[in-house]
Amino acid sequence: MNKSSLPQGVGRVIPPVPQVKVVQSVQPKLTPATNLRLSLSQLTTLRWSLTDEVNHLRLARYDGIGLWRPKVADLGVQQSAKLIRNAGLQVSSLSFAGGFTGMNDFSYADAIADARDAIVDAATLGARNLIVVSGTRNGHTVKHSRRCLRNALAELADFAATNKVRLCLLPMHQYFAKTWTYLNTLEEAVELIGYGGHPALGLAFDTYQLMSEERLIDWIPTVAEMTGIVQIADAKRPPRSRFDRCMPGEGGISLNEIIRSFHASGFDGYYDIQVCSATGLSDDYSETVSKCREAVLRLTEQTITI
């Protein structure tokens, strides 16, 4: 995370943290998930321009695109919005805002200002979800790190709501605690969202980042309503680098159960395919784009339309 991708006192009274109960005994019936809205993250096609991505996603019958702020900046927000709109695509999310604990030479005030810019950009682009990464502990105590994030969310939530943007907290695997975020469990993220008690706060559920969570499927009926976006990738092992993801269906994550459980729990948002991998993907991005969509549809027992 750097300044190009990230991005005082708060008087608002925030209600106490609710008790989170995980549903473990009653599972939704896992019927085939139909009419999924699929998008592809720009992080999957890093070498392509936004123009290339939009053209290929349209041809491959995707519904939307997950945007990354540095690539949007290359073309400009207004021009990017026009290009995407003219192609008939939607924007599933915009990544990232955050770093509220003071990382990469960002002060708290810098991070808040950057997040406000990101919210405005998300609104212009038509992105209902802005992915938020807390930042590392950065030498702070756990208590102070949490306070930084809570204060930031309280400060930004009304502004996000006014712009019809949802701030989606992204918990990440413990491997990324020293470089991206101290928020490393689903339970921590859910507690923070409940603590904020604001409809503009939500969850980014990343299958790769949460692969080591115990009883992950059991969480889904509890978190489906607060989830803004489900990010899809597979993996053959827990993270050892930023590029350990693999094509859906080629790893050990129960993606079919995860998607079908979200569907059964009433989630109707985007499933954003985000396959950042150093190996195993075709050098031909057009092939990767098609295979990603086909893989997810195959997992969820849907008809593949070319």
Image (cartoon, helix red, strand yellow):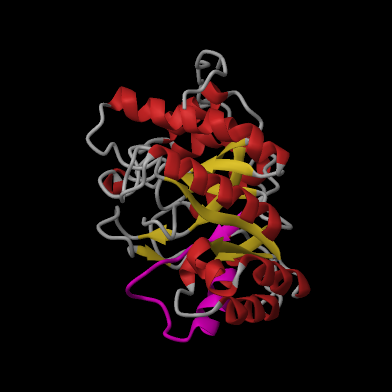
Return the residue nearer the eye: 288 or 183. Answer: 183
Q: Is residue 279 magenta?
A: yes
Q: Measuring 25% from the left and 57% from the top, which residue is drawn there?
A: 240
Image spot of residue 192 (x, y percent): 48, 27
Image spot of residue 46 (x, y percent): 45, 74
Q: Measuring 47% from the left and 70% from the top, which residue is drawn there?
A: 44
Res 219 seen here: yes
Quadrant where the N terminus sits is bottom left
Return the residue nearer the eye: 84 or 285. Answer: 84
- The quarter holding residue 194 reads top right
Question: Which stretch did the figure color magenta?
Answer: 271-293
Res 126 seen here: no
Return the residue nearer the eye: 28 or 244. Answer: 244
Q: Measuring 37% from the left and 59% from the top, which residue is drawn there?
A: 235
Quick check: 27 above or below 66? above
Quick check: 23 above or below 36? above
Image spot of residue 150 (x, y percent): 46, 27
Q: Measuring 70% from the left and 40% from the top, which residue is drawn there?
A: 266
Image spot of residue 267 (x, y percent): 67, 43
Quick check: 171 above or below 148? below
Q: Is residue 33 magenta?
A: no
